[in-house]
Image: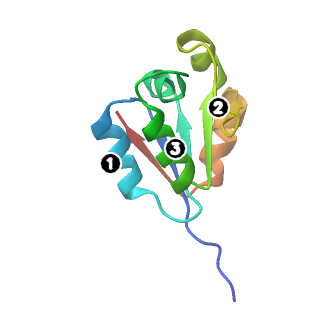
Amino acid sequence: MTTEPVTRLHLLMSARGDAVSTCLAQLGPGDEVLLLDEGVHCLAPDGEHPAQLSALLAAAARVCALETDVRARVPGTHPAVRLVGDDDWVRMVHRHRHVLSWT
């Protein structure tokens, strides 16, 4: 009998260093990150958070961002980050056994 690995969805709602570093420390194999609210500032081109985004992209199985928050807060995104809508967000929550929020 095989079991699927337990993966988690990390909701990163802040671009503050402590929120990002705590999220990074908790990322496991197969975990996904969803940037939303102020967390989308990690995507700002020429912003103050390029190292944070690079670390998230390297550690997470996938990094996504809520499209409405990106459009409202930052002028662009990173090609490796998938933009998602509210319906996608709900599907992501259902796909993972655990959901963690970082603010």
Judge whether 23 appears above or below 102 on screen: below
Judging by the rendered image, the residue that carries numbered circle 3 is 54
* Quadrant occupied by the N terminus: bottom right
Instruction: Identify which amino acid the numbered label 2 is placed on.
Output: His
Query: How is this picture coloured?
Result: rainbow
Image height check: is 9 above or below 81?
below
Observer-nearest of 83 and 51: 51
Residue hosting label 1: 22
- Image quarter in which the C terminus is found: top left
Horizontal and vertical percent position of residue 86:
67, 27
Residue 78's tag is 2
Gap between marks 3 and 1, in whole Å?
A: 15 Å
Give the residue at x 28% y 39%.
Answer: 18
Assess whether mark 2 and mark 1 are in contact (beta carbons under 8 angstroms). no
Single out the mark in the foreground, 1 or 2. Answer: 2
| Residue sitting at the far left | 18
Q: Residue 39: image x %, image y %? A: 45, 28
Determine crowd level at label 3: few under 14, some 14-19, many 20+ residues with C-alpha closer than 10 A: few
